[in-house]
């Protein structure tokens, strides 16, 4: 682990669904830190617990045991109000699909978390973000008038514009063709490199993972491997080594 | 296919409940009306059967003016004492008793107020001893002219006991008696059906109730052993000739009961009318629900089509669902209706004091109407969605596209055509044929037309209304949501429109009528003080004629005129008539010049009636009043109907032949320069012995007279409450479905930081916008309909058009409140959504 401050951290996190015979253990004592200003990927096969880990880190789901911190705040044990405020002010989300409200224009969708919080976006930063995602001439369009890639870029802009402590992205390129996917990943990486944004991304695509600074491999609810400065090849290598089947 | 339908129905329990509820409420109203009428009908059967149980045969004089229970109060024509002896001598008669018993004995209670009655008469009678079902509770019957006995109903209501001095109002001025006895009935009852009874000695009863001695209202006959009532009846009828009605007790019981049932059926029809409105609104709700169900089942239905189901099978699938919902709702509605019927009967019994309701029964009509109404209404509402369902292409099963918003052109054109047809019907009904059926049909068709136009109107109006809430993010999201599905928003709002439009329409007409009459009275009545009373029983309040004479002697009084009122038959046609003690004085009190005192054989008739009946001043007409012989009056004068009270004015002499021989209005005009404050207390003192009436200044009188209009408005508001309630269910339904449909969206919003309270606010704003939009439509349409009616009634004396802005504002405000209430459950549901589950929701 590096010496840089940690944006999000899980300590001995257990997540158990159901009880008795129907008991499913999704996370078995996972401990991981996600450094500020870094782009981290969480990889693992279906059912490995990668999405659950992300949901727990983001305060979308509760943990059974262990603690989760975002910045200096302990997320575990927060009430709905505090969690809502945490999500609004300090966390950004990019989902695989259905990221936008169909009734709002692209600009309104981007501004939504700030509007809900009653804050004004910093104009300079706003312009930077819009420029980065390349949506200047699409701001007045509604989601139904945008392509899938454009919609996802709007979602990215929304996550970036409020400058959250950390952005969680759940398979952000899962529904896109490879060209659009590459674009999204490029400016996610750019926002980390150039603006110091922290991003945690769940993916099962080695190419997507290669855009990040570090990959955490999960299997059966446990961290089984980590890889710094990944390339598609090293990721595939790690997966092929048999320990991690994606 | 049937099994698939039923399974899909069961999977949608919530929607089944919501759309079924509208039918349940409508059916409840319908069957409740039938149950109430049936039970009350049997209650009256029992009541009269018992009341006439001790009467074998009864003789009455044929009424001079017959009035049924629906049309008002009939006055018995007195029969002379000689009839009693003739009947007594007839073969087969064991006993013939001369009975005085008629409405109008008003006891003044220990609190100094007249004992009121809501329906049952206040009988003044002669004491003829206890019959088989009467039981003396205390004391004895009256034997001296200063004594009375009362039934326990009166004693309790008046708070009087044996030995008290009790004042009674009759045809005579207030008299005071000593109460010597209180009686009740078998089974410890205080009265028969809440009837208040006061028994005098025979001469006092005759003078007080009939205005003359030596007459009775009825001869009650007991037949000798071995004789049948029918045989004795026929013998007495032959003996007395054609001027008398001779009937057996059984006959009378049936006739009395039948006349009450006629009144009940009138009441029944009113309830059914409002039930109809409620069901009409229900159709909107069901139509909406089925449209939504079909939209949500698109994939499922397309799959069925792909698997080989025919269009007809798809239609049948949706209609089967409708029949199932209709049947279940009808059965529940019937059960609820029986409950409501029982409650109404109980309330009726309690309000009328002492009416013992028959056991609640369920007539076949209630069951049949419940089933037919429930099923037919649901199926009719489901037809359009069913047809739409059948048009789903099989390929839709494979595609992941929501049905695109269809253009509104067709609906709008249809709406314009239907709306125009409705307006045309309404126009013909109001201005041409004057037929109520056409007017009602016009109103309903207009509603349908407006409902069809609503989607088009909703876009700009909802956007505009929503601006009010756009200051916050949840508000703006709510506004955008309410504009998302114009058809659904429109139909939900249209349902609310119907109830509110009707209430507003009635309010416009009533307020216009009230204002027109008040303005007219303000304009015509010159009298500064009016003596009048508020109804305390079936007969209008009246006062001692002596008050008029004494008021004339007060200083500062210029003229005093009294007005009597009753029904009479004039040239074969029954109508309300007024009489005055002096036409010249009445004309002065009203400020209408040119009318002089009438001779005993003259009457004055309004110019409107002259024109209508083709009469002229000087023509002679036959007038039969409730008492006395047929008179011929010549028309001595005519007047503008707006300028004097009533259409017919009879001379002073006629008042003796009115059913109520006391005046019901007194008009006092003061000398110039005399203030009302100087004379009013004096007049008030004069009417102190007539507690049914009060002396008020002119403006208070006008206010009092227009009180009836407010009562009508309140009644209509209450009865249309059900239709509005159903519309509110529609709003709840629409919101619940919106929340369900937008689960993922809600999840996303929550994920990006929308708080629970903000989520609730968003749903609430959507609800309020829809409700206020519906109310706005209702107020506008209602004001339009009301205005059309008022304009059409221009010739009938409603000259002012009053738009009740305050009430219209109130309706809008209430709609906003209703919107908030309707949003409670859906918004809680929305706020409680699990964020993760919502995002993953398909």
Image (cartoon, coloured by chain):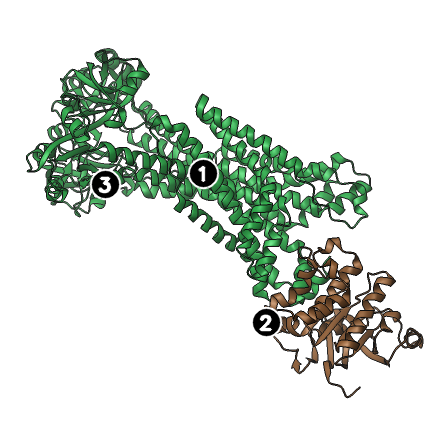
Instruction: Check disc 1 and report the residue beneath it.
Output: B783
Q: Which residue is drawn at 74% across and 34% down?
A: B312
Above or below, comparing residue B696 to residue A133 in the picture = above
At which x and y percent is residue B17? 59, 48
Query: Chain B colour?
Result: green
Q: Are discs 3 and 1 both within one chain?
A: yes
Q: Which residue is drawn at 38% across and 29% down?
A: B261
* Pick the front one: B626 or A111: A111
Element on which disc 1 rests:
helix
Above or below, comparing residue A161 to residue B143 in the picture = below
Instruction: Check disc 3 and report the residue beneath it.
Output: B699
* Pick the front one: A127 or B122: A127
Q: In which quarter of the image is the C terminus of chain A?
A: bottom right
Other residues around mark 2 within 10 Å, as few (<14) / some (14–19) / many (≥20): some
Which sits earlier in the primary sequence, circle 3 or circle 1? 3
Distance, label 1 to label 2, CA atoms, is 47 Å
Q: Which of marks 2 and 3 is in front?
A: 3
Distance, label 2 to label 3, CA atoms, is 61 Å
Query: Chain A colour?
Result: brown
């Amino acid at each position: 682990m590096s010496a840089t401050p940690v944006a999000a951290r899980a300590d001995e996190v257990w997540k158990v669904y159901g009880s008795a015979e129907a008991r499913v253990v999704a996370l078995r004592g996972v401990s991981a830190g996600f450094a500020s200003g870094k782009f981290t990927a969480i990889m693992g096969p279906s059912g490995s617990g990668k999405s659950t880990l992300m949901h727990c880190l983001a305060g979308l789901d509760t943990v059974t045991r262990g603690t989760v911190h975002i910045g200096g705040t302990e997320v575990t044990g927060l009430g709905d109000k505090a969690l809502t405020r945490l999500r609004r002010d300090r966390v950004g989300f990019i989902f695989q699909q259905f990221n936008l409200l169909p009734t709002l224009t692209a600009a309104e969708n981007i501004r939504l978390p700030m509007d809900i919080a009653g804050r004004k976006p910093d104009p300079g930063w706003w312009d930077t973000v819009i420029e980065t995602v390349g949506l200047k001439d699409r701001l007045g369009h509604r989601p139904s008038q945008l392509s899938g890639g454009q919609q996802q870029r709007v979602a990215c802009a929304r996550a970036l514009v409020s400058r959250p402590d950390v952005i969680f992205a759940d398979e952000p390129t899962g529904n896109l063709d490879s060209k659009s996917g590459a674009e999204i990943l490029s400016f996610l990486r750019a926002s980390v490199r150039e603006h110091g944004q922290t991003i945690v991304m769940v993916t099962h695509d080695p190419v997507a993972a290669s855009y990040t600074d570090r990959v955490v491999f999960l299997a059966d609810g446990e961290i089984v491997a980590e890889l710094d400065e990944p390339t598609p090849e090293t990721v595939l290598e790690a997966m092929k080594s048999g320990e991690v089947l994606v | 296919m049937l099994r698939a339908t039923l399974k899909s129905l069961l999977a949608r329990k919530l929607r089944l409940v919501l759309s079924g509820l509208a039918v349940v409420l409508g059916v409840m109203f319908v069957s409740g009306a039938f149950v109430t009428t049936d039970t009350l009908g049997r209650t009256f059967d029992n009541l009269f059967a018992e009341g006439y149980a001790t009467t074998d045969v009864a003789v009455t004089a044929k009424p001079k003016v017959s009035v049924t229970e629906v049309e008002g109060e009939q006055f018995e024509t007195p029969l002379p004492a000689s009839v009693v002896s003739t009947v007594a001598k007839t073969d087969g008669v064991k006993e013939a008793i001369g009975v005085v018993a008629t409405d109008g004995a008003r006891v003044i209670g220990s609190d100094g107020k007249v004992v009121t009655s809501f329906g049952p008469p206040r009988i003044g009678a002669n004491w003829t001893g206890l019959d088989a079902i009467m039981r003396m509770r205390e004391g004895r019957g009256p034997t001296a002219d200063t004594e009375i006995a009362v039934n326990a109903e009166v004693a309790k209501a008046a708070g009087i006991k044996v030995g008290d001095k009790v004042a009674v109002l009759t045809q005579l001025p207030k008299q005071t008696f000593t109460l010597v006895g209180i009686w009740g009935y078998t089974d410890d009852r205080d009265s028969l059906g809440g009837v208040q009874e006061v028994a005098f000695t025979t001469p006092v009863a005759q003078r007080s109730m009939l205005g003359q001695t030596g007459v009775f209202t009825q001869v009650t006959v007991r037949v000798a052993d071995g004789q049948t009532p029918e045989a004795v009846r026929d013998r007495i009828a032959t003996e007395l000739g054609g001027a008398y009605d001779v009937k057996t007790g059984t006959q009378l019981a049936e006739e009395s009961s039948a006349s009450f049932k006629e009144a009940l059926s009138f009441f029944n029809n009113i309830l059914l009318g409002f039930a109809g409105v409620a069901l009409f609104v229900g159709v909107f709700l069901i139509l909406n629900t089925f449209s939504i169900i079909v939209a949500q089942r698109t994939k499922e239905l397309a799959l069925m089509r792909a698997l080989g189901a025919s269009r007809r099978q798809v239609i049948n699938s949706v209609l089967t669902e409708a029949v199932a919902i209709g049947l279940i709702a009808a059965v529940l509605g019937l059960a609820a209706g029986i409950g409501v019927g029982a409650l109404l009967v109980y309330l009726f019994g309690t309000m009328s004091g002492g009416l013992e309701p028959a056991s609640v029964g369920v007539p076949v009509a209630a069951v049949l109407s419940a089933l037919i109404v429930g099923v037919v209404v649901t199926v009719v509402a489901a037809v359009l969605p069913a047809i739409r369902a059948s048009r789903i292409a099989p390929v839709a099963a494979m595609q992941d596209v929501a049905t695109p918003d269809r253009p509104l052109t067709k609906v709008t054109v249809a709406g314009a055509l239907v709306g125009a047809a409705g307006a045309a019907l309404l126009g013909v009904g109001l201005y041409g044929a004057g037929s109520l059926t056409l007017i009602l049909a016009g109103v309903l068709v207009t509603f349908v037309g407006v409902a069809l136009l609503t989607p088009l109107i909703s876009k700009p109006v909802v956007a505009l209304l929503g601006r009010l809430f756009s200051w916050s993010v949840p508000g703006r999201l709510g506004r955008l949501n309410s504009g998302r599905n114009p058809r659904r928003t429109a139909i939900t709002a249209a349902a609310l429109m119907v109830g509110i439009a009707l209430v507003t329409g009635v309010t416009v007409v009533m307020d216009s009528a009230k204002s027109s009459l008040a303005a007219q009275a303000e304009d015509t009545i010159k009298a500064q003080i009016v003596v009048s009373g508020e109804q305390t029983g079936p007969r209008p309040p009246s006062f001692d004629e002596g008050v008029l004479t004494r008021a004339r002697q007060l200083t500062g009084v210029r003229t005093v005129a009294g007005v009597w009122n009753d029904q009479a038959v004039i040239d074969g046609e029954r109508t309300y008539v007024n009489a005055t003690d002096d036409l010249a004085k009445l004309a002065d009190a009203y400020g209408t010049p040119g009318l002089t005192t009438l001779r005993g054989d003259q009457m004055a008739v309004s110019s409107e009636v002259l024109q209508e009946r083709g009469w002229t001043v000087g023509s002679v007409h036959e007038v039969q009043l409730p008492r006395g012989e047929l008179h011929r009056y010549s028309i001595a004068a005519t007047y503008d109907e707006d300028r004097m009270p009533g259409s017919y004015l009879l001379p002073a002499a006629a008042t003796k032949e009115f059913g109520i021989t006391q005046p019901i209005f007194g008009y006092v005009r003061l000398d110039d320069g005399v203030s009302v404050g100087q004379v009013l207390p004096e007049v008030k003192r004069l009417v102190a012995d007539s507690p049914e009436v009060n002396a008020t200044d002119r403006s208070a009188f006008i206010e009092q007279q227009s009180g009836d209009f407010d009562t009508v408005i309140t009644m209509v508001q209450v009865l249309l409450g059900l239709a509005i309630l159903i519309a509110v269910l529609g709003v709840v339904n629409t919101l619940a479905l919106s929340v369900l449909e937008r689960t993922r969206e809600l999840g996303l919003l929550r994920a990006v930081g929308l708080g629970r309270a903000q989520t609730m606010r968003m749903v609430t704003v959507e609800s309020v916008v829809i409700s206020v939009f519906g109310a706005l439509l209702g107020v506008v349409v209602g004001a339009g309909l009301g205005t059309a009616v008022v304009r059409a009634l221009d010739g009938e004396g409603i000259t002012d058009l009053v738009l009740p802005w305050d009430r219209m504002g109130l309706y809008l405000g209430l709609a906003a409140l209703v919107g908030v209430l309707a949003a409670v459950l859906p918004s809680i549901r929305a706020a409680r959504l699990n964020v993760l589950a919502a995002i993953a929701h398909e």
